[in-house]
Amino acid sequence: MGKIRKFSFGEYAIVSSKGMGNTSGSSRSNLFGTKTESTASRKFSFVLSNKTSDSASVQAGSHQVMIQTLRKIALGNGWSVGNDELMESNNFTTLITANRDTTDTWALFMGTSQNGEANLTNGKRMVMVKFASSNKKIEQTSALNSVGYEFIENGKSLCALQYFSPSLKSTNIVWIHKNLDPKMKLVLASAMTSVLLVSSPTSPIN
């Protein structure tokens, strides 16, 4: 418990992990109970390796979810004040170091919504992470369409992942451009593995 199952795709595999079971959270509400705010966060780390001696260390990844619930107050005779609402923010950050090269650490930032700002950067290069859906008319997750993320740099697609599909036989799919250098492939594979761990309903977490 608290570790990631032996997860692999293509030439990449998780060889060690820790921390997935460490979850902390808090909850608070106002005097009248009309507003409740709950937060939960967890940290994890893993090492991803390819078929050679290359490996990437994903350290101090953190995943924080905040859920805010608003409830209306019934005044009687059909009158009420306020509205019933449920708002959720989802923040995810992690650091990736390939082959122990601490001079070239990559940071993955995921925004507070599927269509929010998300990127992967080492301070010199910027890769945008875009939400993608099989139905371009529907921006939000739907049980009827496949969804995932595409990693784009200077208008060029570097890699992509699918974390949900109506067909459970093909839920998690990963693609990486074959012409990238091995180190960049390893960084991208690590970033996509991180996203799968927090996004996929069938993620390989014990």
Image (spheres, rainbow, N blue to C red):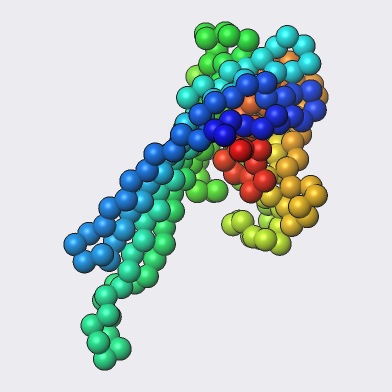
Give the farthest residue toward the bottom. Answer: 77
The x and y percentages for residue 51 are 78, 16
In terms of image quadrants, where is residue 47?
top right
In terms of image quadrants, where is residue 177?
top right
Going 27% across and 80% down the picture, which residue do you hit? 74
Where is 51 relative to 38, above or below? above
Give the farthest residue toward the left. Answer: 31
Going 70% across and 37% down the picture, which residue do you hit? 160
The x and y percentages for residue 98 are 61, 14
Image quarter (top left, top right, bottom left or bottom right) of the C terminus = top right
Please indicate whether residue 157 sits to the left or right of residue 170 in the image: left
| Count of marks placed on residues | 0
Where is 22 relative to 71, above or below? above
The x and y percentages for residue 48 are 66, 21
Q: Is residue 126 among what the camera can see?
A: no
Where is 108 relative to 28, above or below? above
Going 31% across and 58% down the picture, which residue do you hit? 36
Going 67% across and 61% down the picture, which residue do you hit? 143
User: Along the line of sight, which residue is nearer the eye, 174 or 62?
Assistant: 62
Image quarter (top left, top right, bottom left or bottom right) of the N terminus = top right
Where is 99 relative to 136, above or below? above
Q: Is residue 91 among what the camera can see?
A: yes
User: Along the line of sight, which residue is nearer the eye, 12 or 150?
Assistant: 12
The x and y percentages for residue 149 are 65, 41
Please indicate whether residue 160 sits to the left or right of residue 195 in the image: right
User: Along the line of sight, which residue is nearer the eye, 129 or 8?
Assistant: 8
In terms of image quadrants, where is residue 161?
top right
